[in-house]
Amino acid sequence: MASKRIHFIGGGQMAEAIIRAIISNHTAAAEHISVADINDERIRFLNETYGVQTGVRQETALAEADLIIIAVRPQDNLAGVGRIISQHAAKESAIVSIVAGVTIEKLVGYIGDDRSIIRVIPNTLTDTGLGYSGAALNALAAKEQVDDFLNGFGKVQYLDESLIDIFTGYGVAGPNYVYYFIESLADAGVLAGLPREQAWQVALENVTGAVAMLRHTKLHPRQLLDINNSPGGVGINGLYELNNSDFAAGLQRSVLAAVKRTTELGKGHS
């Protein structure tokens, strides 16, 4: 993978996060990554910060690229992007779109039906090597074309495109729910009387440890809850109050609202 040439059309925040991760973990070398963007200042920044190639003509970069990443905004000129890819990209190259809400069918209309096209919803945990991106492939695309690249900034789950909106609202938005839970848990510790820093460290360690425990024991969360809570004890009294709240249903409604909004945003591009 390190010898593959990757060309980004668009150098925004998500493109930068991916570039930073794949260079950091040696998935790709900076000299094999090129970026084109209409913002000259942005291009300068990416070149000076990461050493990626920004002086190559777009036509040349497309002709030489093994992977072409479409990382523009949904409201940008996708038809124009599709035309230049169709005209200059090598036929064997794989086209990866991280443009929110734009379906493979729409991309085929812009680029042509004779190309490997992969629609990707990138995770937001790129710097950690954790988090799942969701990827849907057209009939001409193969996992082998993009697997190393996608695993270079986290992990990947391949899914039918019909599940992309659900994956976005649940999986990619998932860290938001966890951040909110950790913040609330730390606040609870402060409310109970712990100093803020101590409460914060305990919250982080408990979340990290609980995930590690689930992976280590391979037990269901309910089984660990049963183990941890003695009759009439501290834990079960705390859980009783949590059960009386709207916590579980509220979290589930949040996911459904995020999925609904993802679907609404995508309708303008389908």
Image: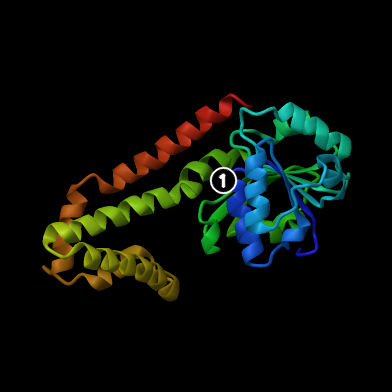
Q: Is residue 115 left or right of residue 228?
A: right
In the rendered structure, the answer to whether residue 25 lies left or right of residue 245 reads right
Query: Where residue 136 sits in the image (x, y, percent)?
Result: 67, 45
Question: In the displayed image of the protein, which residue is found farthest to the top?
Answer: 268
Q: Is residue 246 shown to the viewer in this render?
A: yes
Q: Is residue 112 visible?
A: no
Q: Quadrant of the C terminus?
A: top right
Callout count: 1
Determine whether 167 is above or below 18 in the image. Answer: above
Query: In screen coordinates, is 29 left or right of 59?
Result: left
Above or below residue 171? Residue 224 is below
Q: Quadrant of the N terminus?
A: bottom right
Q: Position of residue 61 (x, y in %)?
A: 82, 46
Name the image quarter holding residue 250.
Answer: top left
Circle 1 SS class: helix
Q: What is the quadrant of residue 253 in the picture?
A: top left
Closer to us: 270 or 34: 34
| Closer to the camera in the image, 130 or 48 | 48
Residue at 74%, 48% (x, y): give it: 54
Q: Position of residue 75 (x, y in %)?
A: 61, 27
Q: Nearer the viewer, residue 228 or 255?
A: 255
Foreground of the two, 17 or 267: 17
Residue lying at 14% horizontally and 70% vertically, measured from the top left: 231
Residue 99 lies, in percent from the top left, at 63, 38
In the rendered image, the vertical position of residue 129 relative to residue 115, given as above or below: below
The type of residue carrying mark 1 is: Gln
10 Å crowding of disc 1: few (<14), some (14-19), many (20+): few
Residue at which label 1 appears: 13
**Where on the picture, by quarter, is residue 28?**
bottom right
